[in-house]
Amino acid sequence: MIIEPRMRGFICLTSHPKGCEQNVKNQIEYIKSKGPIDGAKKVLVIGASTGFGLASRITSAFGSNAATIGVFFEKPPTEGKTASPGWYNSAAFENEAHKAGLYAKSINGDAFSNEIKQQTLDLIKTDLGQVDLVIYSLASPVRVHPVTGVMHRSVLKPIGSAFTNKTVDFHSGKVSEITIEPCSGDDIENTIAVMGGEDWSMWMEALKAANLLAPGATTVAYSYIGPSLTEAVYRKGTIGRAKDHLEATAFAITDSLKDLQGKAYVSVNKALVTQASSAIPVIPLYISLLYKIMKEEGIHEGCIEQIQRLYHDRLYTGKPIETDEKGRIRIDDWEMRADVQQKVADLWIQATTENLAEIGDLEGYRKDFHNLFGFGFEGVDYEADTNEVVDISSIK
């Protein structure tokens, strides 16, 4: 079939297998170009199919020659209907890993569930024995609690009072004002249940109980803080409470891994175009302005550049890992530079529908958004008839 992007709001209903493959290959080439990283050799990535999770799997495999197991929840293709992009990304990753002689297997299913946890434990036990790095990079809006059976839905809302600020429809470029009403009822508790640290802790407890963590094992979960501009709706809103819980969980996990000399860290990463961030009002406008400035300064990074720097400059230097006063690894350091944030704040005041294309990088935002779904890559013939049915070799 000829596969074209079909947009509905902040999601794309189609994805391109060849484009997703090219995306994975580009990231692999970047990691190879940066040289080897003396990192973990047996790695579990929970949330391995897109964004930072995919970048982590690629960096582990092609930077450190690691064996990787990836867990994700993606929609496989059917005849006449494309898969979700993470499916095609994972198929391409496995193909490239196997070509390079690397172990790579994947599990597709709900990572919050006991069944998928058990399936993963069994695979590690059979094939790898133990893992020495666990990356936790889930980004789901919904979680069915494996013990209570309750379905929790996260919300992105301010706490206490409504939040009004500018936003942009990144498709049309229209800048407008938006008001987000404050959370109510169980919104905070539900958001923490989905996006907090409980599931991360459950994974680590299960791995430890089954003796599947190597001595000195490290686990890293990803978080975001962001600027004062988005604070009310993000870091001081419902999602911020969940991130606080995630960060507190790192200390609890570290405590539980003491006998293994293991450690848990939260890495605070920079703002990037993802399916999740595109759905958050205010964030697309912030990212458009941020991209413009960081590209001009020569410090712009995508997911793969961020994770390569995390591994190379923070996790695997041979020295103690540097953290901030709250024990977090800060790989958002370039984004949060005072001069960068001041420039964003100045541009924010000026931003209108008429001038955003000039003062911001809306085109870069759109390109990155299309890239998420495999569109807009050089070297891919988008006019060609493409087979949408692509298998992941390790998933039967």
Image (cartoon, grey):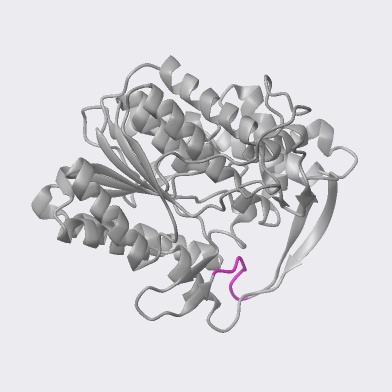
Q: Residue 237 lies in what quarter of the image?
A: bottom right
| Foreground pick, 164 / 271 | 271
Residue nearer the viewer, 62 or 239 = 62
**Percent of width and height locating residue 37:** 31, 23
The residue that appears at 40% across and 23% down in the rendered structure is: 99
Whether the magenta-drawn stretch holds residue 155 is answered as yes
Q: Residue at the left extreme?
A: 259
Placement of 117 over or under 129, stated as above or below: below
Q: Locate residue 11 relative to residue 262 in the image: left or right.
A: right
Q: Is residue 354 magenta?
A: no
Residue at image position (71%, 30%) is: 376
Point 84% across, 55% down: residue? 176
Q: Residue furthest right?
A: 354
182 relative to 292, above or below: below
- What is the magenta range? 154-160
Image quadrant in which the N terminus is located: top right
Residue that appears at 32% across and 60% down: 117
Considering depth in this image, is 117 or 174 the residue closer to the camera?
Answer: 117
In the rendered picture of this protein, how many numbered marks are placed on residues?
0
Is 183 placed left or right of 186 in the picture? Answer: right
Q: Depth check: give the residue in front, 69 or 218.
A: 69
